[in-house]
Amino acid sequence: MKKNKIIQDIEKLKKEKNAIILAHSYQIPEVQEVADIVGDSLALSKAATEVDNEVIVFCGVNFMAESAKILSPNKKVLLPIKSAGCPMADMVSAKRLRQYKKNNPDTTIVCYVNSSASVKAESDICCTSSNALKVVESIDSDKILFVPDRNLGNYVKNNVKNKQVELWPGFCPTHNNISLREALKIKEEHPEAEILVHPECSEKVIELADFVGSTSQIIKYANESNSKEFLIGTEMGVLHILRKQNPNKEFDLLYHNLLCPDMKKTRLEDVLNALMYEQHEINVEEDIRQRALIALNKMLEIS
C-alpha cells in the first residue's frame, strides 16, 4: 500500500473512531508526522489525561501505553506493536522491589516512568527525566531509592542536596552504550558545537555536555540557543523534529549508534492496523492501576 494512501486511511479512521495518535519523539519520522501530539514521556503522560478522544493510539513502547491507560482508564489504549518493550523497564520487577521495601521500610521509592505498571504500583512517586530533580527535592525523606535507571539516578544524586540516593542497577542500553572515546573524537571534529545529552547517559558523557535534559528540554534548548551546530546525545529520532524546527542549524549525533530498536519497530502500516482492527489493546489490573495512579498523579502535580 502506498504511503499517501496509508496516511489518508489513518486520518479517516481517526475521525470515525474518535481516536488520537500520540507518538514519542524517538519514533521514526513518518510516524511522528501522522501523530497529533509528539513529545517525551512527561508531555505524553499529560496529554493522556487531557484529550477527549475515546481511543488513544500510543506510538511508543509498552510502559508508555500502560501509563496512558493508568491515567485514562475509560479510554481504549492501543499499542501498534505488541512487542515494543523497554530493556531498562525489565531490569526491575515488582517482586524484587517489594523485597527491598521489606528490608528498607524507611526508604522512599522514586520510580522513573520507564517502568512497568506493577513497579509503579510499588513506588511512592514517579518521575520523568524532565522533572526527576524536582520530584526528589520535593520528598521529605532523606533516604531515597531511585529505580530503575542508575544513570538518571546518579545525575539526580549529584545535583540534589541533603538526600541519600541509592541507585538501582538498571540502565538504558542505547544511552549507556555511548562510547566516551568516540564522543571525544566527534567533539574534536566539531569544536564549535554545543553538546546536548540526555541524563540517561553515563556520568562521563554527561560531564562533556553543555546541556543535560529530557528530549523535550533538549529540543527547547536547541530552539532557543544562538549556536548553529549541535551534537546530540540521545536517541536519533529526536533529530527529525530538531532539523524540522531549526532548518538553519546543524545537528549530528554524539555517538554513531544512538538507536532504540523497540522505538523503531512501529511503522505507518502498524498505526493503520491498530486503528482498523483496534488491536493490541492495553489493560492494567484495577488494583495495580489504582496504586500506580497514586505515584503517577504525584509526579504530575510536581511537573
Image: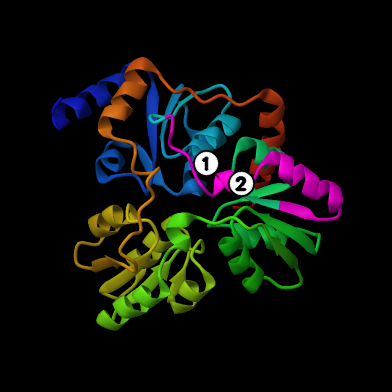
| SS for callout 2 | helix
Residue 179 in view, yes or no: yes
Q: Which residue is mark 1?
A: 45
Q: Position of residue 124 (x, y in %)?
A: 74, 47
Q: Report the quarter where the N terminus lies.
A: top left
Graded by Cα atoms within 10 Å as few (under 14), some (14 to 19) or many (20 or more), the crowding at tag 2 reads some
Q: Are marks 1 and 2 in contact (CB under 8 Å)?
A: yes
Q: Quadrant of residue 224?
A: bottom left
Residue drawn at (38%, 77%) of the image? 181
Up/down of 191 relative to 15, above or below: below
Q: Amino acid at mark 2?
A: Leu
Cα–Cα gap, marks 1 and 2: 8 Å
The residue type indicated by label 1 comes to: Ser
112 in magenta: no
Q: Seen in the image, is 89 located left or right of residue 51?
A: right
Q: In what element is the residue under mark 1?
A: helix
Q: Is residue 96 above or below residue 190?
A: above
User: Which region of the structure is painted magenta?
Assistant: 82-109
For image coordinates 26% across by 45% down, the residue present is: 29
In this orientation, which residue lies closer to the viewer: 63 or 215? 63
x and y, in percent, of residue 203 in the image: 53, 72
